[in-house]
Image (tube, grey):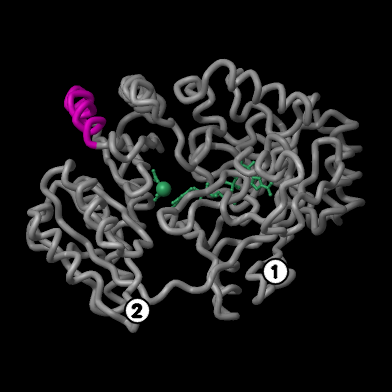
């Protein structure tokens, strides 16, 4: 329970302007993108340095105050949500790009730097930061690390885990750890850095990171293809792999997703005269000396009768427009109706069988509930969104969607798939952790949590079932 004396401590440390208690601020800082839970933090504090974070954490530990670490609040698993009078610790003021090493190809940033800022800073020196997602303008590097974000370039560069060379974290007792110092090679016992990546703010607060940059990819070519049968999509991926094309994205969406984008995203146009059940968005690097890769690739895919139509972007404006058809899905669905989200993954060679097994579940779902499917198919990652009319009561919609979701998770369990490929568990999926993790794994994870955070003050209620 927060007292006036606690607020005085925070105000003395940070200044009045950075200790937020107004209802508007508490509502904004108490929620993420999910909008499922009612936000109810006691205060939001905005430290300016690692020393501030450590001082706040030490104090909260002594006073038994729970902390919710908070980044750009774009999370889709309710990981940054505070429902129970917690202290929200926002990294938003820690937004400096501290250094860029153009020879070692690394960048040292504070945790509150947005993904887009990191991308732009890399571009300024002729390099490339590869994590890319539609929320890049708002989400933080710290949040990307805490969620181990995936994004649309995973197929080429991996997720956030692959980009972190060094990590500074503040532990629940206030100790500051500097992990791996930006080294590329380091085999000296357990790699503790990896423990914090994807830990959703339950083990430590990320305050700084050294991230990996790459040489910029060659110019990319973008194509959207219309596909009649889902089973043909993994086959298209196979053709790309055998052609030794350097893919930078392999995304897919269904007709339902496409129609919703056309309805809600400003200026969206379908590239084709007729609708198709499925679409693939392919992005690939051009060949050496600017050689066309997309045309010969599409010829082969057409020759194999895997697609019914295709368009290749002839300008960067058109490439952006095609990408908009994929990247605007989340925002468009949110405008369209009530939403419940799944973020599942399977081995790529099982996708076709899984989708066939999914069919009867989709058909048996309530008629006013659409199952809108899209995602990073090249990574085996499908986003299933349950979408219902906004005229319906939100809680009732969630209950009905949950019935369908459980059937899908049962099916997924049979395929040994994951109930969260990239968004995390947060508050939303704690009850479903067992579908993807064995009791022994969950027990071991709990022991690690207990060791680092014996009082359970870092992001309580997240990841583990209560
Ligand atoms: P928040 O939402 O603020 O927090 C997320 C979690 O991290 C919480 O548990 C929080 O406690 C913890 N956390 C935040 N900062 C820290 C810190 N410094 N130290 C410790 N813990 C911290 N995700 C993908 O993986 N791939 C996508 O393609 C993708 N696309 C998206 C598109 C849209 C339109 C939206 C709205 C979201 C998308 N996301 C995607 C989800 C989201 O953007 C990512 O999960 C992102 O990494 C969250 O970063 P954030 O800074 O917003 O974190
Ligand atoms: C994406 O890939 C994001 O666009 C969001 O991960 C997915 O809205 C979703 O379900
Ligand atoms: Zn995604």
Q: Is residue 105 magenta?
A: no
Q: Is residue 344 visible?
A: yes
Label 1 element class = strand
Q: Is mark 1 within 8 Å of ligand 1?
A: no
Image point (55%, 58%), residue name = 138
Q: Are marks 1 and 2 in contact (CB under 8 Å)?
A: no
The one nearer the camera, 440 or 11, is 440
- Position of residue 145 in the picture relative to residue 88 (left or right): left
- Position of residue 406 in the picture relative to residue 138 (left or right): left
- Give the position of the C terminus as an image quadrant: top right
Above-or-below relation of 318 to 455: below
Can you give x and y, in whole percent of width and height, for residue 456 in the image? 75, 26
Label 2 element class = helix
The one nearer the camera, 46 or 364, is 364
Q: Is residue 335 visible?
A: no
Residue bearing mark 1? 97
Report the disc number at residue 288. Answer: 2
Give the number of marks.
2
Q: Main secondary structure of the magenta part?
A: helix
Q: Is mark 2 within 8 Å of ligand 1?
A: no
Q: Quadrant of residue 301?
A: bottom left
* Residues shaded magenta: 352-368
Determine the residue located farthest toward the bottom in the rendered image.
289
Can you give x and y, in whole percent of width and height, for residue 316 in the image? 32, 77
């Amino acid at each position: 329970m927060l007292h006036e004396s606690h607020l005085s401590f925070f105000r003395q440390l940070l200044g009045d302007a950075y200790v937020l208690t107004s209802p508007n601020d508490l509502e904004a800082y108490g929620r993420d993108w999910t909008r499922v839970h009612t936000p109810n933090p006691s205060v939001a504090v905005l430290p300016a340095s690692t020393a501030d974070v450590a001082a706040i954490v030490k104090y909260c530990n002594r006073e038994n105050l729970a902390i919710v670490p908070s980044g750009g609040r774009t999370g889709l698993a309710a990981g940054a949500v505070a429902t129970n009078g917690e202290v929200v610790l926002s990294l938003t003021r820690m937004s400096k790009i501290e250094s860029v090493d153009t020879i070692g190809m690394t960048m040292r940033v504070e945790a509150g730097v947005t993904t887009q800022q990191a991308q732009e800073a890399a571009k300024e020196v002729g390099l490339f930061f590869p994590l890319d997602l539609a929320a890049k303008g708002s989400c933080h590097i710290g949040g990307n690390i805490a969620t181990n974000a995936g994004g649309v370039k995973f197929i080429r560069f991996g997720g956030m885990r692959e980009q972190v060379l060094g990590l500074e974290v503040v532990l629940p007792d206030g100790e500051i750890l500097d992990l791996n110092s930006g080294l590329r090679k380091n085999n000296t016992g357990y790699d503790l850095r990896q423990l914090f990546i994807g830990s959703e703010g339950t083990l430590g607060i990320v305050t700084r990171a050294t991230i990996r940059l790459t040489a910029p990819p060659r110019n990319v070519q973008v194509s959207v293809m219309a596909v009649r049968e889902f089973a043909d999509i993994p086959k298209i991926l196979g053709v790309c792999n055998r052609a030794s094309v350097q893919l930078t994205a392999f995304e897919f969406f269904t007709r339902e997703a496409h129609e919703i984008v056309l309805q809600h995203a400003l200026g969206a146009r379908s590239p084709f005269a007729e609708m198709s059940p499925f679409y693939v968005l392919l992005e690939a690097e051009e060949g050496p000396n600017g050689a066309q890769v997309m045309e010969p690739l599409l010829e082969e895919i057409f020759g194999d009768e895997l697609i019914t139509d295709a368009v290749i972007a002839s300008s960067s404006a058109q490439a952006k427009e095609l990408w908009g058809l994929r990247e605007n899905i989340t925002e468009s669905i949110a405008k369209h109706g009530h939403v419940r989200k799944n973020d599942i993954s399977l081995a790529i060679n099982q996708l076709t069988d899984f989708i066939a097994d999914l069919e009867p579940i989709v058909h048996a779902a309530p008629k006013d509930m659409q199952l809108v499917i899209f995602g990073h198919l090249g990574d085996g990652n499908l986003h299933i969104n349950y979408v219902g009319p906004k005229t319906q009561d939100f809680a009732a919609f969630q209950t009905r969607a949950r019935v369908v979701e459980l059937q899908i998770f049962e099916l997924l369990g049979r395929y040994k798939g994951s109930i969260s490929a990239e968004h995390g568990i947060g508050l939303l999926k704690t009850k479903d952790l067992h579908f993807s993790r064995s009791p022994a794994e969950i027990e071991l994870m709990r022991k690690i949590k207990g060791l680092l955070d014996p009082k359970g003050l870092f992001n309580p209620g997240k990841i583990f079932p209560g």
